[in-house]
Image: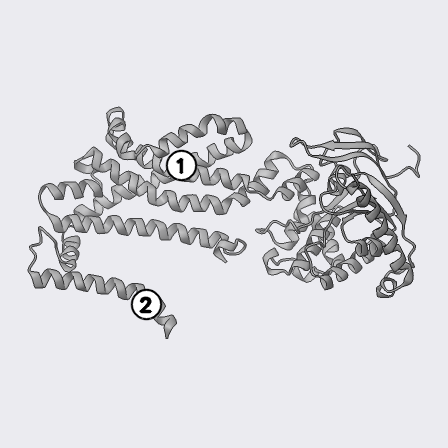
Amino acid sequence: MSADAPLVRLRGVGKTFDTGLRALDGLDLDVREGETLTLLGPSGCGKSTALRMMAGLIAPSEGAVSWRTGARPEIGFVFQEPTLMPWASVEDNVWLPLRLRGVSKARARAAVDEALERVGLADFARSLPRELSGGMKMRVSIARALATRPALLLLDEPFAALDEITRFKLNDDLLRLRETMRATIVFVTHSVYESVYLSTRICTFSARPGRVTQEIAVEAPARRDAAFRASPAFAQTCQRASAALERAYGLEDAP
Amino acid sequence: MTRRLETLAPWLAFALALAGWEAMVRLNETPPYILPAPSLVLRTLVADWDILSAALLVTLRTTLLALALASAGGLALALVFARWRWSERALFPFAVVLQVTPIIAIAPLLLVYLETEAAVLACAFIVAFFPILSNAVLGLRSADRNLVELYELYGASRWAQLRLLRLPSALPYFLGGLRIGGGLALIGAIVAEIAAGAAGKGAGLAFRIVEAGYRLNVPRMFAALTLVSLAGIAIYVAFSALSRLSLRRWHDSEA
C-alpha cells in the first residue's frame, strides 16, 4: 500500500459475539497517521469492540481489519480502569510491556523513566498503586502504554471514572503528550465535550450494532487550552457532534 | 480507656471463665474423674509432659505433612483445571465426593487398605485438600480480565501470564484456603487417630485421649485436649501471620 494509506483500515466489519450479541455491522473506518480520532457514542454502541479490533484483541466476524504496515504496528492500550497489577510497584507496572518481550529491568530503565517522566510521576516510581489517587493511577496506565513507544495509542474511555477537574487535567496532559510523541491516537468516549477538545476528527456511532454515522473534522487552534474550550468554534463543533448523535439515535428510535 | 478495655476484654473473659470453673470445682468438691479443676489440668500437663509432648509431635507432624501435600497437590490440580477447563468438569465431582463424605466414615476403610500412619496421613490430607483446591482454582480464575487482555496484546507466553499475573492474583485466595485447610488437617488427623486407635510409638494426641478415657484419667484427657486446641490455634495464627506478611503491602484484605 502507498505511504499515505491509512494506518488502520476497517472495511465492512461486523461482529457477533458467542452470546449472540451483534456489536458491529458494516463498519467502515480509517485511522490516518498522526490524527487523533474519537469514536463517539453512548455506552454499548460497539465502539470499544472496534477499538479492541484495531488492537488485534478481537477478530471480526466478517469484513477485514488491515494495517498499513502489514502486521499490527506497535500499540499502546489504555483501559477504562487503570488496570494495574496491585502487587507491583509503579515502575514494575510500566516495565511490564517490555518485560513481556524479554527486556530486563536494567535495560528497560531508560524507557520506563522516560514514560513516567512524561506523565509527571517520576517521583512515584517505587510507590504501589494503592498509594496513588485515581487520576495518578490512570497516568501510570498511560505511562505503561507509552513504554513501548507505540505508533498507535488506543484509549478506551480512560477518564470516564474520574472527577471533572482531574479529567480536564488529564485531557491537557494527553494533548501535551500528543505534541511531543507524534503518535496516532484513537480515543473512545461518550463525552461530546471531551471528543471535541481532544480530537482532530470525530466519528459518531449508531446504536448497536454500531457503524459510523457521521464524520466531523474539528477546527482548532494549534494550542488547545481553556480559551479553546470557551471559544465559539468549540461550542459550534460540540453542537454539530451532539446533533449527529441525536440524528443517529432519533432514527434508531423511529418505528 | 475503652480501647484498652477492648484489647483486654477477651483475656479478661477467659481468665474469669477459668476462675469460675476452678471455684465451682473447689466449692462443690467435684471429684477429678468427673471434672478436674484447671489447676489440676495444668499440673497433669506438666507431670505427663513426656508422654503428651511426644504425642503432640506425632499429631503435628501428621498435620503439617498432610497440609504440605494438600497444598502442593491442590495447587497442581488447580493449575491443570485452570489450563484445561474440561479437566475440571471431569475431575471436580471426585473432589466434591471426597469433601462431602464425612472423614470419620472413610477412615475405617483407609485403615483396612493402608498402614496406620499412612491412613491417618491420608485422612488429614483428604479434608485439607478440598478447600485448598477450590480456593486455588477460584484464585487462578480471578485475574483481572483487562490485565489478561493486556498480556495478550503484548504477546505474553502462557508461562509469563501464569507467573506474573495468575499466580500473584491467586495468592490471597490460596492463603485463605491454606488457613482453612490447616485447621481441617488437624481435625482430620485427630479423627483418623481415634478411628485407628493406634498404640505404641506412633500414638498421637487423640489416641492418648481415648486411652486416658478407658482409664478414667480425666485430667489427662483435658490436658491432651488443651494441647489439641493450642495446636489448632497455633496453626491458625501462623497462617494468618503468613497471609498478613505477604499481602499487607497490596491487598485490601490485610490493609
Element type where label 2 sits in the image: helix
The residue carrying pointer 2 sits among few (fewer than 14), some (14 to 19) or many (20 or more) residues within 10 Å by Cα, namely few
Picture disc at residue B130: 1
- Residue type highlighted by circle 1: Phe
Q: Which residue is mark 2?
A: B8
Residue B241 position, x and y percent, is 41, 54
Which residue is depicted at the point 60% across and 60% down? Answer: A131
Chain identifier of the residue bearing label 2 in the image: B
- Seen in the picture, residue A10 relative to A76 is either above or below; the reply is above
Could you tell whether A41 is left or right of B176 in the image?
right
Q: Quadrant of residue B12?
A: bottom left
- Seen in the picture, residue A34 relative to B202 is either above or below; the reply is below
Nearer to us in this view, B21 or A206: A206
Could you tell whether B204 is left or right of B165 in the image?
left
The residue carrying pointer 1 sits among few (fewer than 14), some (14 to 19) or many (20 or more) residues within 10 Å by Cα, namely many
CA distance separating discs 1 and 2: 37 Å
Which residue is depicted at the point 25% across and 36% down? Answer: B192
**Which residue is the extreme one toward the bottom?**
B1
Nearer to us in this view, B101 or B234: B101
Nearer to us in this view, B219 or A237: A237
